[in-house]
Image (cartoon, grey):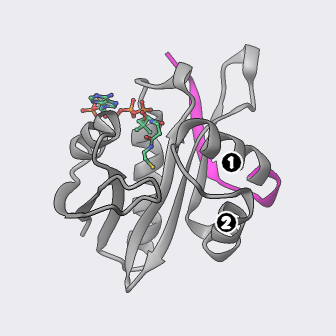
Amino acid sequence: MAEFRIRKAAESDLLEIIRLWKRNIKTINTASDIAELFYAFENYFFVAVSTSASIEGKLIGFVGGAVREEHGHISGIAVDKEYRGSGVGRGLIKAVEDEFLTDAFERVTLEVRKSNRDARRFYETQGYKPSYTIRRYYADGEDGVVYAKEIC
Ligand SMILES: CC(C)(COP(=O)(O)OP(=O)(O)OC[C@H]1O[C@@H](n2cnc3c(N)ncnc32)[C@H](O)[C@@H]1OP(=O)(O)O)[C@@H](O)C(=O)NCCC(=O)NCCS
């Protein structure tokens, strides 16, 4: 069971966010793509930090939000494998959704690989609904499924 707290990400977290992103998400995003997103949308990046005595302060997850066409967007979310299933992902999603609401965005979208069953189940438990599929959305040819949620 992971013990953790969620806080806004800081610039000093960026290298670790990049590591978490690349370790947990099948992506062709480079470190500079991720850094670019971070600097454009820093306000919508949150990290989960362990509060367990043995690993206190360790970053165990992150979410990266963005604004796209007048709505909130989740660009990436990941929790390191050994800390999954303890509500960390749920806490991260809630943090970024709260920030979107504060800024008056009432709709949140995201794309996920069609084959990523774990993430799709996760998003569905958090109230996201599959909206449509984009054929060959990913560089390797896999389809992307667009999910959306009204958060108002
Ligand atoms: C998706 C991910 C972030 C979920 O993080 P997590 O900390 O394990 O999720 P939580 O423990 O907060 O689970 C929240 C809910 O999702 C459900 N859930 C999480 N993983 C699930 C799975 N593999 N299968 C079914 N349900 C799942 C939980 O049952 C829980 O439901 P509840 O709110 O009704 O209790 C994590 O699995 C991950 O990092 N995956 C790899 C990265 C990835 O694919 N990211 C998405 C693409 S950007």
Relative to 72, is 125 above or below?
A: above
Do the CB atoms of the residues marked 2 and 1 lie less than 8 Å apart?
A: no
Identified by mark 2, the residue type is: Asp
Query: Which of disc 1 and disc 2 is earlier in sequence?
Result: 1
Whether 31 is drawn above or below 58: the answer is: below
Q: Nearer the viewer, residue 110 or 135?
A: 135
The residue shown at (26%, 63%) is 135
In the image, residue 84 lies in the stretch drawn in magenta: no
Residue range of the region highlighted in magenta in the rendering:
1-13
Give the labeled residue for mark 2.
Answer: 33
Q: Nearer the viewer, residue 6 or 39?
A: 39
Residue at 50 percent of width and 54 percent of height? 76
Q: Which residue is mark 1?
A: 17
Nearer to us in this view, 102 or 67: 67
Question: Where in the image, quadrant-wise, is ligand 1 located?
Answer: top left
User: Which kind of residue does numbered mark 1 sit on?
Assistant: Ile
